[in-house]
Image: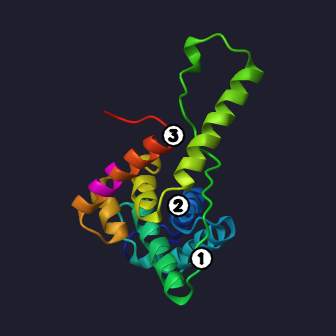
Amino acid sequence: MADPAGLDEGAIADQIAALQPRLCRFAWSLSRDRDEAADLAQETVVRALGSQWRFTPGTNLKAWLFQILRNLYLNRQRSTSAHAETVLFDDLDANLGLADRQVNPVERAVIVKTQLEDVLAAFGSLPALYAAPLHLTAVEGLTYLETARILDIPIGTVMSRVYRGRQLLLTRLGKRTP
């Protein structure tokens, strides 16, 4: 059923549902708790579906959903002070440069898993102050401006936090930059 603004509610609902895994990953970067992240993502979907009339066609649906999720997270933080310390990304994929070497498939899988675990552990140790903007820009591919709007901070702050987050991540991975 289409509404007067020309939005197809079914199509938007499908797009919202398709973004749920990304919502979970962003929620993990904020909460550092798998169960809380799943709850936040689910509640975000429910709220977005209930207020999809507020979404402006032609704008970034993903950014709108991330803003809803962030607001839910902040509301929860205000009511409770719990904060877990684990970050997981099930779909993290990286080009580890193994194509240049002849490695059997089992060895390749072990190397990839070990390196991804190192990256996940290093990312998990980042303060949320740096993890959230880094996740939104590097993993989700949002612009600095979209990230600034979602996190409700100036764009310059996003840029500096992404830079510092990357530096911390590289340091924790033992790859210091000049």
* Residue type, label 2: Ser
Q: In the image, residue 101 lies at what x, y percent?
A: 60, 12
Q: Quadrant of the C terminus?
A: top left
Whether residue 90 appears in magenta in the rendering, the answer is no
| Residue pictured at 44% horizontal, 42% vertical | 171
What is the spatial separation of the Cα atoms under label 1 and label 2, in whole angstroms?
16 Å
Identify residue for label 3: 173
On screen, residue 158 versus residue 104, left or right, reads left
Q: Which residues are magenta?
A: 159-163
| Residue pictured at 60% horizontal, 41% vertical | 118
| Residue pictured at 39% horizontal, 58% vertical | 133
Q: Please, is residue 74 above or below residue 159 in the view?
A: below
On screen, residue 65 versus residue 27, left or right, reads left
The residue nearer to you, when weighing 8 against 119, is 119
Of callouts 1 and 2, the N-terminal one:
2
Whether residue 160 appears in magenta in the rendering, the answer is yes
| Image marks 1 and 3: residues in contact by CB distance under 8 Å | no
Tag 3 secondary structure: loop
| Residue pictured at 39% horizontal, 69% vertical | 6
Identify residue for label 2: 29
**Hey, which quadrant is residue 146 in on the image?**
bottom left
* Residue type, label 1: Glu
